[in-house]
Image (spheres, rainbow, N blue to C red):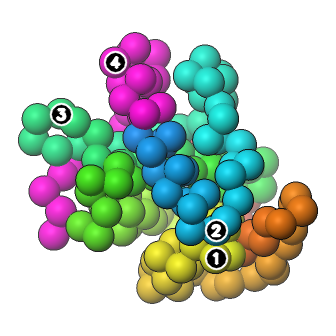
Amino acid sequence: MPSASVRPLDLNDDRTAAAVHAVGRAAYAVEAELIGFDGIPALRESLAEMRERPLHWLGAVDGSGAIAGFLAWEEEPDGSVCVDRLCVDPSWFRRGIASLLLRHLLTEALPGRRIIVTTGAANTPAVALYARLGFVRGATFSPAPGLLMASFTRPGEICGPAEN
């Protein structure tokens, strides 16, 4: 079990935003190597561009307050949820952080919701994670020459926007 807890992240806080940006850059650099494609948009995204995205953020934070990983999503008009990014600091790889974040999203933050995610088709660790957590593999597509992406969906019981 990871020695981190999950909590919402506030990217209006400069230190939090800078830490999230640094973790994202490091994680996407590893993914770029895994999939053989260095054009991942988030890898080139500035801190300001990241903060402007209309996303909800969860972080896995260790006892010292350092961000071990994060997950960000947006809610679709039909009530489904699209995971925009799931990143783990490479120093925390293979310690259950991605699983911790996804399980929290599925059971605590957005239980019963349909969840959609994509990843590089050659990102074997991510593909295995989504399959292990009950996501169903959908289409493989190529948004750019030399890049294959795999889509995954985890069905939910809620069909339509969540009520507030």
Q: Secondary structure at mark 1?
A: loop
* Amino acid bearing label 1: Ala
Q: Secondary structure at mark 3?
A: loop
- Mark 3 closeness class: few <14, some 14–19, many ≥20 residues within 10 Å: few
x then y, percent, for residue 142: 86, 68
Q: Is residue 140 above or below residue 86?
A: below
Q: Which residue is mark 4?
A: 15
> Which quarter of the figure has residue 33?
bottom right
* Amino acid bearing label 3: Gly
N-term-proximal mark, 2 vs 1: 2
Q: Is residue 3 magenta?
A: yes
Q: CA distance from mark 3 to mark 4?
A: 11 Å
Which of labels 1 and 4 is toward the front? 1
* Amino acid bearing label 2: Ile
Q: Which residue is mark 1?
A: 122
Q: Which residue is mark 3?
A: 65
> Which quarter of the figure has residue 63?
top left
Q: CA distance from mark 1 to mark 4?
A: 33 Å
N-term-proximal mark, 1 vs 4: 4
* Amino acid bearing label 4: Arg
Q: Which residue is mark 2?
A: 35
Q: CA distance from mark 2 to mark 1?
A: 5 Å
> Which quarter of the figure has residue 140?
bottom right
N-term-proximal mark, 1 vs 3: 3
N-term-proximal mark, 2 vs 3: 2
Q: Are marks 2 and 1 in contact (CB under 8 Å)?
A: yes
- Mark 1 closeness class: few <14, some 14–19, many ≥20 residues within 10 Å: some
Specify the segment rendered in magenta.
Answer: 1-22
